[in-house]
Image (cartoon, rainbow, N blue to C red):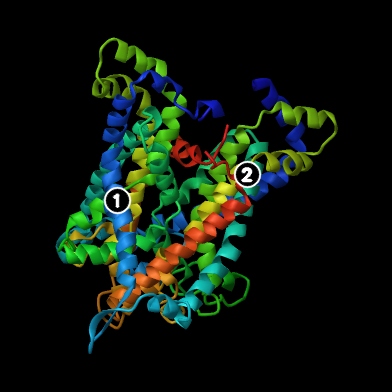
Amino acid sequence: MKQNIDKGQKINKGHQIPAKIFMVICILYFILPVWWLIVAATKNNAGLFMGTGGPMWFDKHFALWDNIKELTTYQDGIYWRWLFNSLLYALVGGVGATALSVMAGYGFAKFRFRGRKVYFNIVLGALMIPTTALVIPTFIIMTKIGMNDTIWAVILPSLLSPFGTYLMRVYCQSSLPDEMMEAARVDGAGELRTFFQVSLPIMTPAITTVFLLSVVNCWNNYFLPQVVLANTKLFPITVGLTQWQAKSNAGAGVEQVWNLITCGAFISVIPLVLAFLFLQRYWVGGITAGAVKQ
Amino acid sequence: MSKKKNNVVPHGTKSLSTTRANRWGWLFTAPFGIVFILFLVVPLVYAFFVSLYSYTQVRGTIFTGLANYKRVFTDPIFLNGLKLVVLYTIVMVPIQLLFALLLALVLDSMKSKFASVSRLLYFLPYAIPVVIGALMWGFLYSKDMGPFTSLFQLFGMKAPDFLAPGSIFGSLVNMVTWQWTGYYMVILYSALQSIPTDLYESARIDGASEVKIALKIKVPMITSSMVMVTIFALIGTLQFYTEPMVLRNNANSAIPPEYTPNMYAQALEFNYNQMNYAATVSFALGLLVVIFSVLFMTLTRKQSGLED
């Protein structure tokens, strides 16, 4: 393998300069908007409009701390409440969705029960149903049963993860040897014990992946909370920030909190970007598992 | 991850008695099944049920059968939204796919530290929530806060208005491309990585150029992943919602509240209080997306690798 790489590099040498220029341009394209956000988070409203450094550089007035202070006081610090809500929805939804997917994926992969094929095909088909088509109907049902405008209206629907279930099934089939489960059974372990003590430890990498993907899905969720929530205090960060944005754009002397939007957006992105950097192999594992055949 | 096809049938379970397999199989899958029914099947069925009724102030809610569907497929607002979304799909999916493919091929041909760092940076926008990405681009497109005004001044030109009705299409295409290309690139790159490298060696010995190797060996070998990526992009674009919804706050003259079918459904529900018709729009859109995807998958069945 190593040898192949070395040879490959030697042969590639001539192509590398135009390729590198192309890559640098692409890096700039993907990274400059993020850089803009970092810089904008350190500016106050005036600095955002006519700062000394221009849009892509720091203002001479470094307002990051002022912005953070203002975030904790503006509307009684509702920003932090939103951030906490996002965390809560993402964690509870993520843990729940993962638990259900892990069990179901395991069940589909390891037990030949009656109706399995039809059942699984229905789940597979559901992968194609656009989640946004479910939002308005879910809202109507939630209204009927009086669950709108509660955290459950956001959390319960996000427990559903057909993709996670599909991934877990694929993983269990390919990486969980039946012989091991057999051995546990011969030793007299019940199904639950086999599941928890023998199978789960082997499934850890896939569980991490599914958990990460579910958390990100819940964190990114916008359409559903935007529709089912009316109480500002229950908003996740995404809905909260866009509401500030809408208000600021309405303009005409109302509240223009551009600095809070940019700083708030920046802070909210930090946990995800950090998680992304440290756990990227799990994300990659997850998004490629369904697509890449080996 | 999966090794061989013949692994698909869980052969070991045959030693498990049928009753035991039946019981435990259902027990393990039931919690998911319940959530699946409650939050997928029920909303869908309910939406269909609701869409068969209409509400008027004079007569209350009455059964109107498929009348709402007749209405939706002749409704110029819905059809315009649909046309727009299809247009976005036609423009956006190939751009993202080709861009991602190009990046993956370039990265695959260079195995250096620089390449692995760039791969990470291309993928970074995926870690940024779509809403935040849309917020950022809203600022970047702005005349007062974005960098383009001064950038164009540098060359003595006037920056175009990215949020005007005439340019909003391109602005949204750029936003989506920025957000998702890295994600698709990762899928294609991983697929390229799984091709045995000795294939390239023999081609090189035969005098094939790197470009030729890329086009004649690498691309054909990853067709199944390209089909998957296309399906992801297709489903994603057809339900276009978050980006135009967020950008609408900056560009409400260019993006009407019923710009895409999803936005139309929301507007019907909340601004016009037409619950039955809103459900019809949602259901019709869902149906169309499924039809589109199934159609695409049937056309490419051999490559998609989803048949098991």
As rendered, which of B129 and A286 lies closer to the eye?
A: A286
Task: Please tell me whether residue A11 is drawn above or below residue A128 in the rendered image.
Answer: above
Separation of marks 1 and 2 at Cα, in angstroms:
31 Å
Q: Residue at x 48, y 70 (%)?
A: B141
* Residue type pointed to by label 2: Gln
* Residue type pointed to by label 1: Ile
Name the residue that disc number 1 marks.
Answer: B37
Residue B96's spot in the image, x, y percent?
Answer: 58, 56
As rendered, which of A18 and B155 lies closer to the eye?
A: A18
Quadrant (top left, top right, bottom left, bottom right) of the C terminus of chain A:
top right
Where disc 2 sits, the SS reads helix
Task: Please tell me whether residue B275 is drawn above or below residue A9 in the rendered image.
Answer: below
Name the residue that disc number 2 marks.
Answer: B303
Residue A52's spot in the image, x, y percent?
Answer: 42, 66
* Chain letter for the residue marked with disc 2 in the picture: B
Task: Please tell me whether residue A190 is drawn above or below residue B263 in the rendered image.
Answer: above
In the rendered structure, the answer to whether residue A112 lies left or right of residue A289 reads left
